[in-house]
Amino acid sequence: MVQHDWSQQIQDAVFKKWQDTGGKGIKVAVLDTGLDLEHPALRHLNLAGHKLNAATPGFDPKLPLLHGNGDVKDAHRKRGHGTQCTSVISSKPAGQDALSGMAPLAELFIVKVNTVKDFLKGLEAAANLGVDIVVASIAYLPGDAALEGLAQGEIDRVFGRLKESGAVLIAALPNMDTGSSWLGIAANSFPSLRPEVVNVGVVSQAILDERKAEIDAEPGIDFVVSDANGQFCKINGEYVEERISSSYAAYLVAGIAALYLASLKKRLKLDYKPMEKADFVKGIGQKFTKLANAPQLNDTTPFFLKKSNANA
């Protein structure tokens, strides 16, 4: 019996024709801390050619399929960050406390990363695999790339390769509290500081009440999601209920994006083409609530919110 169905949780933010696709035909690369492929709800993701460890010495992003059987075990120090986040998109009912993801038919590539260098390698590998969406809720300080000896030209080259491939990167903004300003938030986090990235944050009712004007004014924010309670896969085969963080929020938006693109591909067939960021954001946010008209948030159903002055 399904205890928590993410498809039901997002019904107000999607059209039925999107949900009916299950994300079929869409490729998603997950750049994160890895995945517990032994979890009963995630075993279906243990596929040859779909497990890349970009932190492995000798990893060549130009030849990603050669590394598609790498060790991607989720070794996050606390609970298994990548495992929990990925379960939003692709978990399948299994076990007593079954969980169901929103786009279980999407094809997922698990890309384990650690440093900024790993991240860029994973991003380039995802582009070379021809994915539609890259989702990353692992972030770095803006100066970390320089500390690792990475030149700006190399960063630009990789993001250029991603754009050339037609893939879109969806990233998590830092988690904020009521006393923190949202102005300039994207500039303080990599990869969110890149203008081509679709940035997602999370808000409580208190933050929305106090910081709505700042969120609306900040160009580096594309969507915010309310911090409702949700259930997620935990390492060692467990499940856990937690409040939605910005990490989870990015995956929620990525799952909705997979459903949206799957619907487009199904309808347009050979006429389908990747779109620019502005059109992509407008497309997936068609049923998102504007910040100006945001309802009272609650603890059980996430609200997906967009700029009050954007994509009217």
Image (cartoon, rainbow, N blue to C red):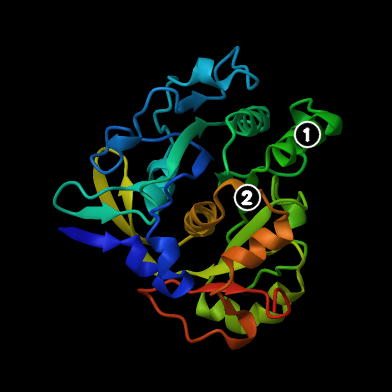
Q: Residue pushed farthest front?
A: 270
Please name whichever residue, 202 or 196, is drawn nearer the observer in this view of the structure: 196
Give me the residue at 43% from left, 39% from top.
Answer: 107
Residue farthest along the top direction in this orientation: 58
Secondary structure beneath dot 1 equals helix
Q: Quadrant of residue 121?
A: top right
Amino acid type, residue under disc 1 in the picture: Ile
**Identity of the amino acid at label 2?**
Asp
Q: Nearer the viewer, mark 2 or mark 1?
A: 2
Which residue is depicted at the point 73% across and 61% down? 278
Above or below, comparing residue 184 to residue 130 in the picture: below
User: Residue 155 has which mark?
Assistant: 1
The residue that mark 2 highlights is 271
Spatial separation of the CA atoms under disc 2 and disc 1 = 31 Å
Secondary structure at badge 2 equals: helix
Instruction: Look at the picture and state if 38 lies above or below 306.
Output: above
